[in-house]
Amino acid sequence: MAGSHVYTDYHPRWLRRQVSTYWWLEKWAYFAFILREMTCLFVAWFVVYLLLMFGAVAGGADRYQQFLAWSASPWVLTLNAASFLFMIYHAITFFVAAPQALVVHVGRRPVPARLVLVGHYLGWAAASTLVAWLLLRPS
Amino acid sequence: MSDRITLQVARYRPEQESEITFDEHDVPCLKDWVVLDGLNHIKDRIDGTLSYRWSCRMGICGSCGMTVNGEPKLTCATFLSDYAPGPVRVEPLRNFPVIRDLIVDIGDFMRKLVRVKPWIVRQVEKPLTEGEYLQTPDELDEYKQYSLCINCMLCYAACPIYGLDSKFIGPAAIALAQRYNFDNRDQGAADRMTVLSEHEGIWGCTFVGECTKVCPKHVDPAGAIQRYKLTAAMESMKSFFLPRGT
């Protein structure tokens, strides 16, 4: 819809349709895209939450206990649960998109997209296992 | 299954209307009839003033792209029976100015396409006596997928980014640029990067991904754009860390 169209007697009034403000509600795929973009807000929240936790740990035992009590409040729990779900959505949509952007070659042969996808999930599982082991191992 | 189906066809006659209106026509719903057959039936037997583009009737020319029940489709490859019992709503492609009825102006795309130089660029041509530029099947496979684009504009119609920002170069133009970037006979990648790396180039794309879903030739323009983002980012890093080149 560039503004450089030349109007002539034969094309007196081309119809230029405006995109609705609510275009993202017209199709599930568009809505899913907007949800995916919104996940960045929750990623940002988790970064802030992590920084707050670092600050509490650095502030000593009392401050850390206050942080834990604050974290147990219903609104923080709800926010963190929602953020967790959005983070999973973020990861899944990222993994689904990855094979399209990442065309890996072994020798001259491209690696099938399915394998690239599986590789991402395996990496995710490995990283989650490592974190779980670090958190749950007996001290 | 009924042997007839209702087509709701968008009409825009600029000499008498300022908005799209819809005409309804009952057309035969034969097993092998596509939406384009229904439109041809209307044009031939009911209303000869209906205007739309078509040519090959076999998904090659890319002329008959329209919006069918809200989805961008090649009308020559969209069966009426899939929409039974109907109605089937046929509108012009979205995101383009409508010239008349189902005909849109794709001049914006044509101007952008030229900017990405969708042809083989050679810095130095080798003499004819040295023969053809031969390619292996693997080298052909690198770009073959992108060479299947038929410029049908379904990807532009499906792309909300293009609808919101008409400066965005768009999916097909970038996929066609990649078709030549991945061709080992081509030496024009640096020329194309100037255009593709603009904000309105690859970085305009937010990866909605609908361009790939609607592509009738499975070109995967969204993939082409994301791959070029990776290339452009790597080139940017290289020029930052190795300003004098390798």
Image (cartoon, helix red, strand yellow):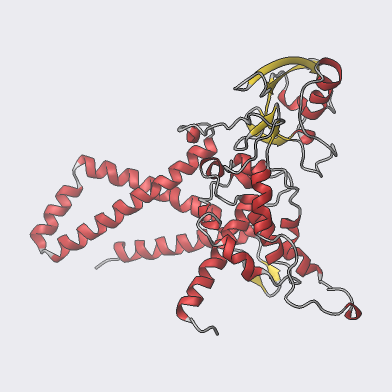
Question: Is B36 located above or below residue B105 in the figure?
Answer: above
Q: Quadrant of the C terminus of chain B?
A: bottom right
Foreground pick, B2 / A71: B2
Q: Total number of numbered labels?
A: 0
Residue A133 image offset from top left, x and y in percent: 35, 64
Counting from the top left corner in percent of width and height, residue B202 is at: 55, 57
Left or right, B146 with respect to A131, comes to right
Which residue sits furthest front? A9
User: Is residue A117 among what the camera can see?
Assistant: no
Residue B75, placed above or below residue B44: below
Give the residue at x 53% y 52%.
Answer: B205
Task: Judge whether A71 appears above or below A56 on screen.
Answer: above
**Direction left: furthest residue:** A62
Q: Residue at x 71, y 61 (%)?
A: B179
Residue located at (84% from left, 37% from top): B55
Name the spot of residue B1 as percent of width and height, x first: 78, 17
The one of B184 and B30 positioned closer to us in this rendering:
B184
Spot occupied by residue B93 in the image (x, y as percentages of width and height): 66, 34
Asked whether residue A63 appears in the rendered view, the answer is: yes
Q: Is residue A54 left or right of residue B164?
A: left
| Image-based side of B107 in relation to B38, left or right | left
Q: Quadrant of residue B178?
A: bottom right
Quadrant assignment, res A57: bottom left
* Residue ID at (20%, 49%): A71
